[in-house]
């Protein structure tokens, strides 16, 4: 059985490392990206889409909301679950995430169990 592929997009090296190290311990293949533009190019070129993506909202170049909209408007990628991981935790942010098509929303800081729960729920 293939490992589930998890993409994490966050401009924080600490968050990418935290997610990568911890999810790898549970047998997931984690592919980290520092910015959404790079992730978008790689995902479009990939033969196998990821099983789930964890995406920060506030990033340079392409923010998480714009990334989510682009992915959800593309029929090839629209069904990939996207869960925001962010320190932006207002009602407006949660509502905007839903409008962009996000499947979930996790506020920083978070225990790794929250990501594991999202993986089980959405992928």
Image (cartoon, helix red, strand yellow):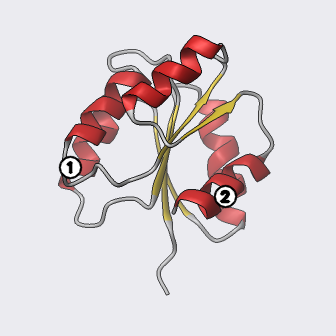
Q: As displayed, is residue 70 above or below residue 52?
A: above
The location of residue 72, given as percent across then percent down, is 29, 40
Query: Mark 2 or mark 1, which has the lower sequence index?
Result: 2
Q: Secondary structure at mark 1?
A: helix
Residue at position x 22%, y 41% from top? 41
> Label 1 belongs to which residue?
44
Q: Residue furthest bottom?
A: 1
Residue hosting label 2: 23
User: How dense is the environment of label 2, judged by Cα within 10 Å: few (below 14), some, or many (20 and up)?
Assistant: some
Q: Is residue 89 above or below residue 105?
A: above
- Horizontal side, residue 51 vs residue 30: left or right: left
How far apart in space, not on screen, are marks 2 and 1 (Cα)?
A: 23 Å
Q: Is residue 57 left or right of residue 72?
A: right
Q: Quadrant of residue 17?
A: top right
Give the quadrant of residue 107: top right
In the image, residue 32 lies at what x, y percent?
49, 45
x and y, in percent, of residue 43 in the image:
28, 50
Helix, strand or loop at label 2? It is: helix
Residue at 20% from the left image edge and 55% from the top image edge: 76
Q: Residues within 10 Å of mark 1 (few under 14, many from 20)?
A: few
């Amino acid at each position: 059985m293939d490992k589930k592929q998890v993409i994490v997009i966050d401009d924080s090296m600490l968050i990418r490392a935290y997610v990568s190290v911890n999810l790898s311990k549970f047998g997931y293949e984690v592919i980290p990206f520092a910015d959404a533009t790079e992730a978008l190019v790689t995902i479009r070129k990939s033969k196998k889409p990821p099983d789930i993506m964890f995406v920060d909202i506030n990033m340079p170049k392409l923010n998480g909301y714009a990334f989510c909209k682009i992915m959800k408007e593309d029929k090839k990628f629209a069904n990939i679950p996207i869960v925001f991981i962010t320190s932006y935790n207002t009602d407006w942010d949660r509502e905007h995430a839903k409008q962009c098509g996000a499947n979930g929303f996790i506020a920083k800081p978070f225990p790794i169990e929250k990501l594991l729960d999202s993986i089980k729920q959405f992928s």
